[in-house]
Amino acid sequence: MRSSGFRAGGRISPALNPVANCRVRFGWKVSSGEISWSDETFRIFQCDPHTKPTLEFALTRVHPKDRELLQQQIERASRDGKAFDF
């Protein structure tokens, strides 16, 4: 019998989950202000990989439905002084 890719509880196996295998990454080190993007993030945001990303630019490139979540992550990281990956 073939595996459906689902585990008990209805969750998708990490091997078959496209999100788990995603190479898109957006990170911010609050202490240094350093922002890091994966090559895939640059491609999706349609900008040159040599571009230095900023928080303001990222907010303009994120889908409107995701913008509030990213803004909340930025505010939380600023308040707590902790880095985050999105």
Image: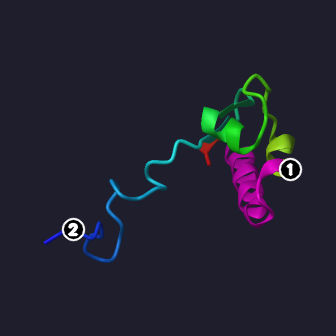
Residue at x 80% of width, y 26% of height: 51
Query: Is 63 covered by the magenta stretch?
Result: yes
Question: What colour-coding does the image apply?
Answer: rainbow
Residue at x 35% of width, y 70% of height: 11
Residue at x 86% of width, y 43% of height: 56
Which x, y percent locates residue 42?
A: 70, 36
Please give left or right for residue 32 compared with residue 55 in the image. left
Residue where numbered disc 1 is placed: 60
Q: Quadrant of the N terminus?
A: bottom left
Q: Earlier in the sequence, mark 2 or mark 1?
A: 2
Residue where numbered disc 2 is placed: 3
Which x, y percent locates residue 76?
A: 70, 53
Query: Is 51 covered by the magenta stretch?
Result: no
Establish if 53 lies above or below 84.
Answer: above
Which x, y percent locates residue 57?
A: 85, 41
Which x, y percent locates residue 64?
A: 80, 63
Is the residue marked by circle 1 packed among few (<14), some (14-19), or many (20+) residues within 10 Å? few
Please give left or right for residue 73 compared with residue 8 in the image. right
The amino acid beneath tag 2 is Ser
User: CA–CA distance between discs 2 and 1?
Assistant: 41 Å
Q: In the structure shown, which secondary structural element does the residue marked by tag 1 occupy?
A: helix
Kindly report which numbered mark, 2 or 1, lies closer to the viewer in this rendering.
Answer: 2
Is the residue marked by circle 2 packed among few (<14), some (14-19), or many (20+) residues within 10 Å? few
- Range shown magenta: 61-81
